[in-house]
């Protein structure tokens, strides 16, 4: 069994509801238990001209293989109306595998750890609600190192009432 962290993001069609629905779907994955969900956070898109995003992180314990999990996540994205019109385009739901235990995965469809997680406050701060600060990436950096290099700027942490949790 592996502890897996999933980044969730949405900036279309009621983002908070999209994330709630995604959490329900993650909880129903085969051979998997949902171990935790962070608060929801809002932030501007990294690309100008898109609606603001709502992001969160979920922790799973799973015996699925990485590609099986990726297929399941893409099925959830598709169920929630994801249309792949343009790379980096606005989306109803984005589910990314951040970490898969301590595995390094470098396949055409899947690179883990997620290649930009260390740059993204909207990933690191919710992750820090679920994972220990001592969590180590393959290059030896810890989550606390990454947080120290990535200021909490432009992030708005929603209260449970605001995110309707
Ligand atoms: N910006 C924010 N704030 N959150 C995201 O999830 C996100 N995802 C993206 C791009 C367009 C890079 N910007 C984002 O894919």
Image (spheres, helix red, strand yellow):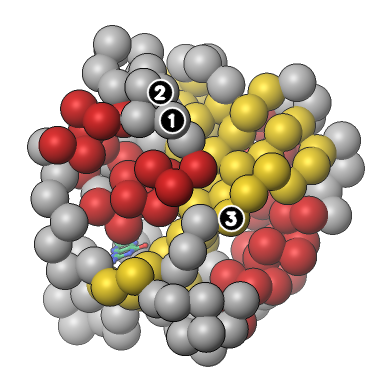
Q: Which residue is mark 1?
A: 132
Mark 2 within 8 Å of ligand 1, using the beta carbon: no
Instruction: Give how far across and how far down residue 144 sits, in percent.
Output: 25, 30
In the image, which disc is placed on residue 101?
none
Q: Are marks 1 and 2 in contact (CB under 8 Å)?
A: yes
The residue lying at 56 percent from left, 27 percent from top is 100
Position of 51 relative to 73 (above/below): below
Mark 3 to mark 1 CA distance (whole Å): 14 Å
Mark 1 to mark 2 CA distance (whole Å): 5 Å
In the image, which disc is placed on residue 135?
2
- Choose the circle earlier in sequence order: 3 or 1: 3
The residue lying at 40 percent from left, 53 percent from top is 126
Instruction: Give how far across and how far down residue 129 sits, in percent.
Output: 44, 47
The residue lying at 36 percent from left, 60 percent from top is 87
Q: Which residue is mark 3?
A: 37
Which-is-in-front pick, marks 3 and 1? Answer: 1
Label 1 SS: loop
Q: Residues within 10 Å of mark 1 (few under 14, many from 20)?
A: few
- Choose the circle earlier in sequence order: 3 or 2: 3
């Amino acid at each position: 069994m592996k502890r897996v962290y999933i980044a969730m993001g949405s900036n279309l069609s009621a983002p908070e509801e999209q994330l709630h629905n995604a959490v329900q779907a993650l909880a129903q994955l085969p051979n998997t238990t949902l171990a935790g969900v962070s608060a929801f956070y809002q932030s501007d898109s990294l690309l100008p001209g898109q609606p603001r995003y709502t992001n969160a992180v979920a922790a799973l314990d799973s015996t699925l293989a990485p590609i099986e999990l990726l297929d399941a996540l893409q099925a959830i994205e598709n169920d929630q109306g994801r249309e792949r019109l343009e790379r980096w385009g606005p989306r109803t739901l984005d589910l990314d595998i951040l970490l898969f235990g301590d595995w390094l995965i470098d396949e055409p469809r899947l690179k883990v750890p997620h290649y930009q997680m260390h740059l993204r406050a909207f990933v690191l701060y919710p992750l820090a609600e679920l994972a220990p600060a001592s969590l180590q990436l393959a290059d030896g950096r810890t989550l606390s190192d990454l947080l120290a290099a990535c200021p909490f700027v432009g992030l708005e942490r929603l209260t449970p009432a605001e995110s309707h949790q």
